[in-house]
Amino acid sequence: MTDETSDAAPAVVTAARALAAPMTIDAEARTVDVVWSTGARAPNYVPPLGQIMEELDMSGNAVRMARLASGQAPLLDSHSHYSASSVIGRVLSASVSGGRGVAKIQISRAPDVEPIWRRLEEGTLRNVSVGYRVFRYEPIQADGQTIHRAVDWEPYEISLVAVPVDAAAGVRGEASAIRATALEPDILAEALPVPEITESVMTTENHAADSVPAADATRATQDAVTAERSRMASLTPVVTAARGRVPQQALDDLHVRAQSEGWTAEALRAALWDAAVASAQPASVPAAPAAQRGESNDDPTVMARAMGHALAVRAMPSLATDAAIDPRFREFASLRPSDMLMELAAARGERVSPRDRLRLIERSFHTSSDFPLLLEAAGNKMLEAGFTAAAPSYRQFFAQRAFNDFKAHKFLTAGDMPALVKLEEGGSIKAGTISEKRETITPDTYARQVRITRQALINDDLGAFTDFGAMIGRRVADLENALAYALVNTANGDGPTLATGNAAVFGTGASRANKASSGGAISEATLDAGYASMMAQTSLDGIKLNLTPAILLTGAAYRGAAIRYTTRITADQGANVGLYAGLSPVSDANIVGNRWYLFASPSAAPVYVYGYVNGQTAPQVRVHQYVPGTDGVAVEVVHDFAVGAIGHQGGYFNAGA
C-alpha cells in the first residue's frame, strides 16, 4: 500500500452504496437493524480520476462517525435530498465494528410513509444504501488493477432503495444467507449518483497505473474545479432571493447542505420552497364564531386570537365594525398585554398571581409562547386592513396573473394565438405558431422588521408595534405602486425591453408603431392618433386586432386635461360632445413630466402584469425570537410580489409637450 496523498489537499466526493439482505423488524417500535457497509469494492465515478474501483476502509480511524451516530441523521427514500417528504425516518444509532457499519433505523409513522413500511414488513423491500463523502483516497494495487481505498470518509445518511450494490452487507437478518446483486455497467450512472468534487483536488504519483494521461488528468481536474466553482456561485442568488421568506436557520442549513452535497441551484430552490411553505402563515380569512368552528371559548388559541384582535382595534378603531374581527375582542379591549399573558396562562391551567407577571413576560421571549400569537393576530389584521383600503392606481391598467412559485413564469400576449384557418373537406388541420420568445417574469420577496423588547412589554408600551402595523399595509401598497411605475418609466417611458422583437414596449419602428413620433399635449388630434395606432396593431400572423383604448394615464401635469377630454357632455351643450367619454382617466404622481399613455382593458390586451406567489394576495406577518439568547422578538412583514411587461399591442405612448 502507498500513501502518496497523505500531504496533499484532500478530495471531497459524495456518493452512495446500496446493500442487500433479509431483515428483522420490531413492528411495535418500527425499528430495523441494518448493516450499512462492509467496505466491499464497487465501481464509482470520481472526477478527475474518472471510472475507478473503490473500496471503503472500515477501520475505526478511517470513518468519521459523529454525524451518523448523532441520533439525528435522516433515513431517506432513495437518497432524495430535495423534499421534506423524502425523510421517511431517522438513524437512531450507528457504529463501526469488526469491519462492518451497523445501525438501528426507525421508520416514521406518517401516512405517506406507510406503503414503505408495508413493503418492509412483507419482505419485498430489503435494500439499504448509505450516502457518504470521501475526503482522501489511497491508491493500491490488487488483483492486477488499481483500487482506490477511501481512508478518510464520512457517512451522513442511510436510505432504503430498490437497487443494491454491496453484496456482503444489508438489512440484518438472523442466520440468513445473503445473495449478491451486481450492477451492470450501463446502469451504473443511474444507481450511483455522479459525485461532486471541491476545488481541493486529490493528487497522486501513480495515476499512470489508471491509464489516464497526465495532460488529460490535469485538464479534467481544471474542468472539475471550474464546474464546481460555477455550481457554488449559482447557489448564492437563490439564497439571496429566499431571505425573508424562509426562516434564517433553515436557510443557512439548506445552503450548507447544498454546498457540501453537490446540489444544483434548481435543487436548492425546490428545497427552499418546501421550507417556505412549511413556515408560511395561513392567509387571513374571516373568523367564524368559536361555536361554529367547534372550538371552546376557553381554548387559549381562541382567546389569543381575540386578544390579538383587541390590540388591532386599539390601534385602528375602525376595525371594530369589521366582520372578520373576532367579536370577543371586546372582552379583552381594556387589558394590558401583560394582563393578556396572565389570562392565557390561567386558561392553560397554570397558577398565576400578579407577582408572576415579570416571569411570564420573560418567558414570552424564549422558545414558543402566547406572545407571538397575540402579535401575529394583531399584526395581520392591521396590515390586511391597511393594505385592502389602499387602492394603488397601477392596478387599473396592469393585469393580475397567478405565480405558483419563485421561478420565471412565461406568458402569452395579445395576438400570440394563431388565427383559425379554413379546413377543407378531407384535409388536415394546419399547425399555427406561437412565439418562442414569450415574455418571462420572476417574483421577488420584500420584507421589513421591527423589534419588540422586553422593556417595552414590561412598560406595556407597544406603540412602535401598533404604529408599524397600522401603517405598513398602506406602505406595502405604495411599494407595489412605485415598483409598477418604475417599470413603466423605464427608458424614458418607453418601458423595458421585450423578448418579442428585442425592443422596448413602446417605439416608433415597424415592430411596434405604438409611440408618437413627436411629443404633444393631450388634444383631439393626438388622442385620435393614439386610437388609430392601437386599432392598427396586429397578431403574429398579421390580423388586425382592432384594440380600443380604455384608460388614459397621465401624471399630475395633464390630470385636468385628461378629466376634461373624458367627461361625458350632455346634449344641450351643443357641439361640446364627449368624444372620449369611454376612456377612464387615471393620474399618478409617479408618471414623469408630461408623459401620457393610452391602454386597452388589461383583460383584453395586457401590456403590464402583476401578481402574488401561491395565492397570498396580501403581505404576511411573522413573529419570532429576535436573536437567540436575547430578550426581544422580531415582527417581520414578508411580501412576495411580481411585476413585468408581457406585450406591446395594448398600449400607446406620447412623451407630451
Image: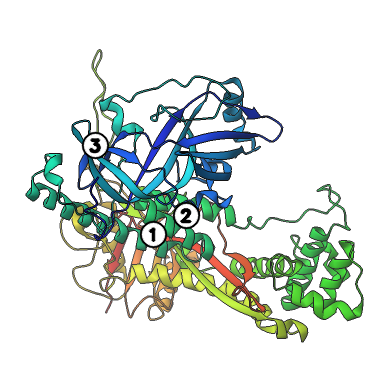
Question: Tag 1 or tag 3, which sits nearer the N-term?
Answer: 1
Q: Is residue 206 above or below residue 231?
A: above
- Whether residues under marks 1 and 2 lie with C-beta atoms below 8 angstroms apart, the answer is yes
Query: How far apart are labels 2 and 3 at the CA level?
Result: 36 Å
Please, what is the three-letter code of the amino acid marked with disc 2? Leu
Q: Is residue 275 left or right of residue 352?
A: left
- Whether residues under marks 3 and 1 lie with C-beta atoms below 8 angstroms apart, the answer is no
Nearer the observer, 197 or 609? 197
Query: Can you tell which of label 2 and label 3 is closer to the viewer?
Result: 2
Question: Where, quadrant-wise, is the C terminus in this rendering?
Answer: bottom left
Query: Circle 2 is placed at which residue position?
Result: 272
Nearer the observer, 560 or 124? 124
Q: Residue at x 43, y 78 (%)?
A: 589
Query: Circle 1 is placed at which residue position?
Result: 238
Residue 587 rendering spot, x and y as whole percentages: 44, 73
Query: Circle 3 is placed at which residue position?
Result: 433
